[in-house]
């Protein structure tokens, strides 16, 4: 996948994730996004396909949160000589300073082979739209109503 397509898919996935999450949260989610990239979220101990590479040195140290990145910085970091993570799960993490912060939980296996990408039947592979983490004891919109996206900070 070339860089421009990867950037476009990131932007599409960001809009989809915010749109999906808006129905559940009390805050307005701005269409200005910053990203918290979490690399190496997969188990990569199984044998690699001939077209896969891993970058174990990218793993964050326990307790460290990544610095926010804009979309271009995300692509600069994750697009590596035509290889991208095989899957990237997208979550709305919080709202602050006029931005919707999206967490990108990334597979540790990188590939240039589109056949190895997850979410190929969507309009933005390898991105999987996950919405947000639900608060404890939240049941549904009907039973519990909307909640604050920033519930973890309260």
Image: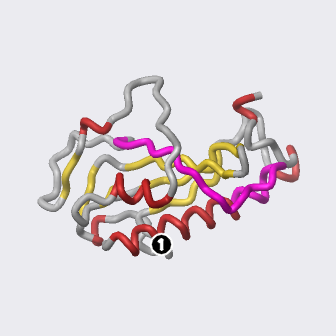
Along the viewing direction, whichever of 24 and 101 lies nearer the viewer: 101
Give the residue displayed 47% in from the left and 37% down from the top. 66
Q: Quadrant of residue 51?
A: bottom left
Give the residue displayed 43% in from the left and 54% down from the top. 73
Q: Secondary structure at mark 1?
A: helix
The residue at which mark 1 appears reads as 8
Residue lying at the far left of the rendered structure: 50
Above or below, 66 against 62 in this view is below
Which stretch appears magenta? 20-40
Give the residue displayed 55% in from the left and 70% down from the top. 12
Is residue 13 rendered to the left or right of residue 121?
right
Mark 1, Cα crowd under 10 Å, few <14 / some 14-19 / many 20+, is: some
Q: Quadrant of residue 96?
A: top right
Give the residue displayed 61% in from the left and 56% down from the top. 33
Above or below, 26 against 86 in this view is above
* Quarter of the image that includes the C terminus: top right
Report the number of discs.
1
| 25 within the magenta span | yes
Q: Where residue 108 sits in the image (x, y, percent)?
A: 31, 46
* Quarter of the image that includes the N terminus: bottom left
Q: Where residue 91 sits in the image (x, y, percent)?
A: 58, 50
Q: Quadrant of residue 131?
A: bottom right
Is residue 15 rendered to the left or right of residue 142?
left
Q: Where residue 47 sits in the image (x, y, percent)?
A: 15, 47
| Colouring of the image | secondary structure
Q: Where residue 2 sits in the image (x, y, percent)?
A: 31, 73
């Amino acid at each position: 996948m070339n860089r421009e397509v990867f950037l476009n898919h990131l932007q599409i996935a960001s809009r989809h994730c915010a749109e999906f999450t808006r129905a559940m949260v009390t805050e307005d989610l701005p269409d200005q996004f910053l990203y918290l990239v979490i690399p190496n979220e997969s188990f990569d101990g199984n044998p690699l396909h001939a077209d896969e590479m891993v970058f174990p040195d990218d793993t964050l140290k326990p307790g460290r949160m990544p610095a926010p990145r804009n979309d271009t910085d995300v692509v600069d970091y994750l697009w590596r000589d035509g290889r991208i993570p095989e899957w990237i799960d997208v979550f709305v993490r919080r709202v602050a300073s006029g931005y919707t912060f999206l967490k990108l939980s990334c597979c540790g296996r990188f590939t240039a082979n589109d056949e190895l990408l997850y979410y190929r039947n969507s309009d933005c592979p390898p991105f999987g739209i996950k919405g947000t983490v639900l608060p404890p004891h939240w049941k549904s919109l009907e039973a519990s109503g909307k909640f604050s996206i920033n519930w973890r900070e309260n």
